[in-house]
């Protein structure tokens, strides 16, 4: 590469780094007890699987309490993370930055920021309800990664995200097979919200034995169906045959769903 090319690359890299730095610095968010939101989210995620009554469990609950104290002030940061996108230019510069050794740059792809958004939403849970309209808007993003991120965040809010149900159903009705992650996260969200069974259950069944069964993601539809408990009894005839599926994960998911729905094991014989 000639000198002019090198200079242009450096200038472009500086511009890109400035943009990425804005995302990174912005992701630190508001503070509590002298620690930024980003630190509390890291601690919450790090100790998420801690055993009850252990020292790590105490740290986990301290992180949850801190994020809860920050409350809705955290939402602008979390929404910015959930909506992060990878442009072609950004992807190119991340690869370029990873190849050079002159300076260490903390550049991350969009899915890194999407994961970080889930740390905050999982800790806030229902308290993040004010973010539902913005997350519903993200469900209509042209970027499938952003749609998948928004659906996952809605799943972590739970029943308080009922407002997003129509948009989630629309995804299940219209999404393309190559964007299966968007559909799976939307199914998860619908299961965690578990409202409007008369509307949601028929759509989920499309992926079990209906028009979209060929997607082979029935295992992801059965968990949400089970979340509807006895309200999903109409789904039993569709789930029963999957108890004999060659795939053990499908059989296990079918069995779990039937148990949650309340279909007794002795009545399966």
Image (cartoon, rainbow, N blue to C red):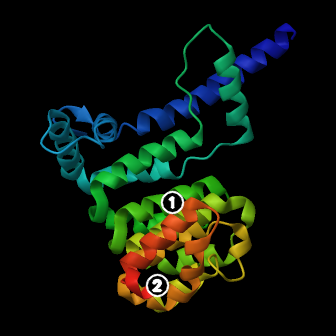
Residue 173 vertical placement versus 66 (above, below): below
Locate the N terminus by quadrant.
top right
The residue drawn where x is 73% and y is 65% is 177
Mark 1 Cα-neighbour bin, 10 Å: few <14, some 14–19, many ≥20: many
Question: In front: 15, or 137?
Answer: 137
Foreground: disc 1 or disc 2: 2
The residue drawn where x is 65% and y is 20% is 97
Marks 1 and 2 sit apart, C-alpha to C-alpha, by: 38 Å
Q: Provide the residue designation for mark 1.
A: 150
Position of residue 45 in the picture relative to residue 256 (left or right): left
Position of residue 3 in the picture relative to residue 189 (left or right): right
Q: Earlier in the sequence, mark 1 or mark 2?
A: 1
Q: Residue furthest right?
A: 2
Question: In front: 210, or 31?
Answer: 210
Mark 2 Cα-neighbour bin, 10 Å: few <14, some 14–19, many ≥20: few
Residue 134 image point, x, y percent: 46, 64
Residue 120 vertical placement versus 21 (above, below): below
Residue 197 image point, x, y percent: 45, 87
Count of numbered tags:
2
Q: Provide the residue designation for mark 2.
A: 268
Quarter holding residue 192:
bottom left
Q: Is residue 174 visible in the rendered structure shown here?
A: yes
The residue drawn where x is 63% and y is 76% is 207
The residue drawn where x is 24% and y is 47% is 67
Q: Which mark is residue 67?
A: none
- Indicate the secondary structure of the residue bearing disc 1: helix
- Indicate the secondary structure of the residue bearing disc 2: helix
């Amino acid at each position: 590469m000639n000198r002019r090319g090198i200079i242009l690359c450096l200038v472009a890299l500086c511009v890109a780094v400035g943009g990425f730095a804005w995302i990174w610095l912005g992701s630190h968010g508001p503070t509590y007890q002298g620690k930024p939101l980003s630190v509390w989210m890291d601690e919450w995620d790090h100790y998420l699987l801690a055993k009850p009554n252990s020292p790590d469990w105490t740290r986990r609950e301290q992180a949850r309490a801190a994020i809860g104290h920050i409350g809705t002030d955290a939402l602008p940061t979390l929404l910015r993370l959930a909506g992060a996108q990878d442009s072609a230019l950004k992807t190119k510069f991340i690869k370029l930055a990873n190849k050079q050794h002159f300076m260490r740059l903390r550049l991350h792809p969009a899915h890194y920021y999407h994961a970080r958004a889930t740390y905050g939403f999982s800790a806030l849970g229902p308290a993040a309800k004010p973010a539902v309209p913005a997350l519903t808007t993200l469900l209509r993003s042209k970027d499938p990664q952003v749609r998948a991120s928004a659906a996952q965040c809605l799943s972590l809010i739970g029943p308080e995200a009922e407002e997003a149900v129509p948009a989630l159903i629309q995804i299940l009705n219209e999404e393309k097979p190559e964007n299966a992650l968007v559909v799976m996260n939307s199914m998860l969200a619908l299961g965690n919200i578990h409202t409007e069974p008369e509307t949601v259950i028929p759509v989920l069944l499309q992926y079990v034995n209906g028009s979209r069964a060929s997607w082979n993601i029935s295992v992801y539809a059965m968990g949400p169906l089970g979340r509807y408990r006895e309200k999903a009894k109409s789904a039993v005839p569709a789930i029963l045959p999957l108890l004999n599926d060659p795939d053990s994960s499908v059989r296990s998911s079918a069995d779990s769903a039937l148990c949650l729905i309340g279909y007794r094991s002795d009545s399966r014989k």
